[in-house]
Image (cartoon, grey):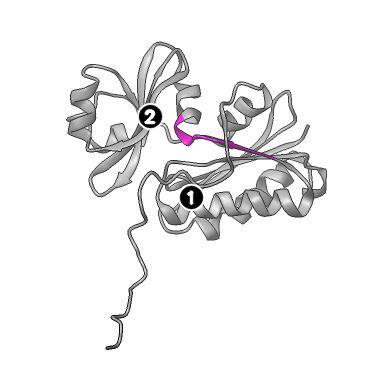
Amino acid sequence: MLLLAFDTATPAVTVAVHDGSAVLSEASGSGAMAHGELLAPAIREALASAGATMSDLTDVAVGVGPGPFTGLRVGVVTALTLSQTLGLTAHGVCTLDVVAAAAGGGELVVATDARRKEVYWARYVDGVRVDGPDVSAPADLAARFPGVPVHGPGAALYPDLLPPASSQAPRAADLAALVATGAAVELPVEPLYLRRPDAVPSVAPKQA
């Protein structure tokens, strides 16, 4: 196996290459509206650092969200394109699961920024997702799971409401490890939006 993994569901663009036993390389960038510009160079950097080329790949894994429309679409479309053009096996994984995998055991919540003063979230017990993914106001999430530690960028955004255990963004290295070890709960390789995009096409009024 030579797996290329990446996630663009948050402002952090993260890429890793995994050989089935260990992570060979990582690359990253950050920019809330620059996923399209950052992902391709990060993929090239990660492959070069691993001493590999696109033709060496056997699998591609992508975080399918939840996340904002534009960034999430960049990652999913890239994964689908690579899968179709190179004949790779494609794997979709909930981005919140990736953060939870790095957070450890026990009961915890993972939260990321959903904009509109909301967070995407899921609850885990010993690494197993038992609630979500869903989208809520931070106050509603805090009231639903009082005292449960919160991991992910959403914790840093609302520390007065969500008890922050860590603000770690998803890492492609953790995504790759989940898939390579068979521990991932795989989802269809399609964007997990949870709600409609902010921008909607205008509809011209019908002529009488």
Between 190 and 95, the residue placed more toward the observer is 190
In whole angstroms, how far apart are the C-alphas of marks 2 and 1?
18 Å
Q: Position of residue 72 (x, y in %)?
A: 48, 50
Residue located at (48% from left, 36% from top): 95
Name the quadrant of the N terminus: top right
Q: Is residue 185 above or below residue 61?
A: above
Residue located at (28% from left, 80% from top): 205
Give the residue furthest to the right.
55
Q: Of helix, strand and loop, which one carries label 2?
A: strand
Would you call the spot at circle 2 few (<14 residues within 10 Å), some (14-19), or many (20 or more)?
some
Q: Of helix, strand and loop, which one carries label 1?
A: helix
Q: Does the magenta portion include 94? A: yes
The amino acid marked with disc number 2 is: Gly
Bounds of the magenta span?
A: 90-96
Q: Position of residue 204 (x, y in %)?
A: 32, 80
Q: Position of residue 199 (x, y in %)?
A: 34, 63
Residue located at (67% from left, 21% from top): 181
Query: Left or right: where does residue 45 sit relative to residue 72?
Result: right
In the drawing, what numbered circle is on residue 72? 1
Query: Left or right: where does residue 85 sit relative to residue 132?
Result: right
The amino acid marked with disc number 1 is: Leu
Q: Is residue 21 above or below residue 175?
A: above
| Residue designated by label 2 | 132
For discs 2 and 1, the disc positioned in front in the rendered view? 2
Would you call the spot at circle 1 few (<14 residues within 10 Å), some (14-19), or many (20 or more)?
many
